[in-house]
Amino acid sequence: MYENRNAATVAVPAPQPPAEGVTVSPPPSAHGAQPSTTESPATRVAVRERVVGQLTRFVALAGRTRSPYQAAVIRIGYGFFFTCYLLREWPNRRVLFGDRNPWSLGMTKALTADTHAFSVLTWSGDRWWFELVYHGAIAAAVLLVLGWRTRATAVLFLVGVLAVENRSPFAGDAGDDIIRIMAVYLAFTRCGQVWSLDARRRRRQAGDARRDRAGAALWLALGLPLLGASCVHWDGWLGVFWVMWGLQGLRFAMDRWAPRHAMRSLLDSGSAMLHNCAMLVIAAQVCFIYASAGLYKSQGTKWQDGSAVYYAMHLDLFRPWPWLTDLVSTNMLVIFLLCYGTVIMQISFPFTLMYRKVKNVLLAVMILEHVGIAVVLGIPFLSLAMIVSDSVFLPTALLVWAGGRSAVLVRRIRGRYGRYVGGPCLEGVVNAR
């Protein structure tokens, strides 16, 4: 269009300043929306630094290995438990777990296929294979107690436990169920940091992990049977073992060629976090065991009227010493207190974890109760399994004190026979004290 030059010129008055005390809102934008307020660059940098600082503190806190002494007690306790169990059943091993077992190999394969359980004893029904697995499980349990190459022996211990327990799943009791569950969690812990041969080896190597050639050789040696088993009998559990084997190999490689690389620190922090999660799961599992057992007992009529312990003591299966059982069961007040006290302690135990002093007292009482069950009712392995599981809640100061007393005793014995060389007998005790 053409411009109209003859149009009248309209004068636009200049904007007047607002009167005093009158607030004028800013004009709306072209789309009618209020202008958005943007943060200044300094504010964004401060928020980013705050978030990064919190994440750094969280990683530093979670990347530290927690409860190393409790993990060592659990390692020694479960290894001792399984060693004693296999040695006790050694004369009857073929009937319970071997080629003479009434629960045939075909029935075991059908059950494991349905439940997705894992047992290397299902790979062959020959006697030589059973003897190899059974005595290998004993050797792995003994090495785990000693703390020799705990990263490898903990996994071998898991394989041995699953092999034996899943071969005859109906031949055990609640203690077998506990060791089957806890062995899985134990394989993910750093259970050899104190009170182990691994700790002594690290002290002698002075932190130089590149000198650990025996560990790399053991890692390669374990990879060969794992490869053979994967080619013949593939299972989902073997995939888990491959992941463990690969991560351990990556750790050896970083220690050998890049000990100061950031990836090495990341692996160490991830291992510590995995250990902390495993210890937390063990504690949660113990709480679940006690809470569920107490709630189930509270629904029974015999537990409600306070006579359940009396009837249990008069079963022939639970009377190893009849005179002791009769001595306890004749006092009905004691029986009543044992019934109600057991239910109350088991239900209330998870809630006492928030109060340290109450938890310690209740923990001592429950350990004494398990000792009484082992002696009076003749159930030693179930009681030992629960005592070992309860040790995850023991105070660290108590364990350090017990380790120190044990170190002094060992030094006195070695000094008396002229065998003491010097240095702490139990790794970590002196540093912790």
Image: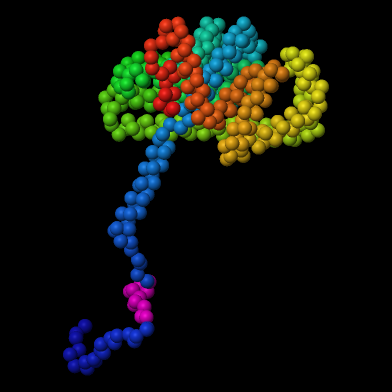
Q: Nearer the viewer, residue 304 or 337?
A: 337
The N terminus: image quadrant: bottom left
* Residue 201 seen in the figure: yes
Question: Eyeballing the image, is 338 above or below 37?
Answer: above
Residue 28 at x, y percent in the picture: 35, 75
Point out residue 357 in the picture as x, y percentages from the top left corner: 59, 36
x and y, in percent, of residue 52 in the image? 35, 47
Taking the spot 52% from the left edge, 6% from the top edge, the residue there is 128
| Residue 71 left/right relative to 352 | left
Residue furthest left as drawn: 5
Q: Quadrant of residue 387?
A: top right
Residue interval drawn in magenta = 23-33
The way the protein has been coloured in the rendering is rainbow
Q: Is residue 359 left or right of residue 222?
A: right
Q: Residue at x 37, y 84 (%)?
A: 21
Q: Taking 131 as reference, is 346 above or below it? A: below
Rendered residue at 19%/85% (across/down) = 2
Task: Determine if the magenta segment contains residue 395.
Answer: no
Residue drawn 61% across the image and 36% down it: 358
Q: Is residue 119 visible?
A: no
Residue 111 rendering spot, x and y as whole percentages: 61, 21
Q: Main secondary structure of the magenta part?
A: loop
- Quarter of the image that includes the C terminus: top left
Q: Is residue 30 magenta?
A: yes
Q: For this rendering, which residue is in front, 67 or 105?
A: 67
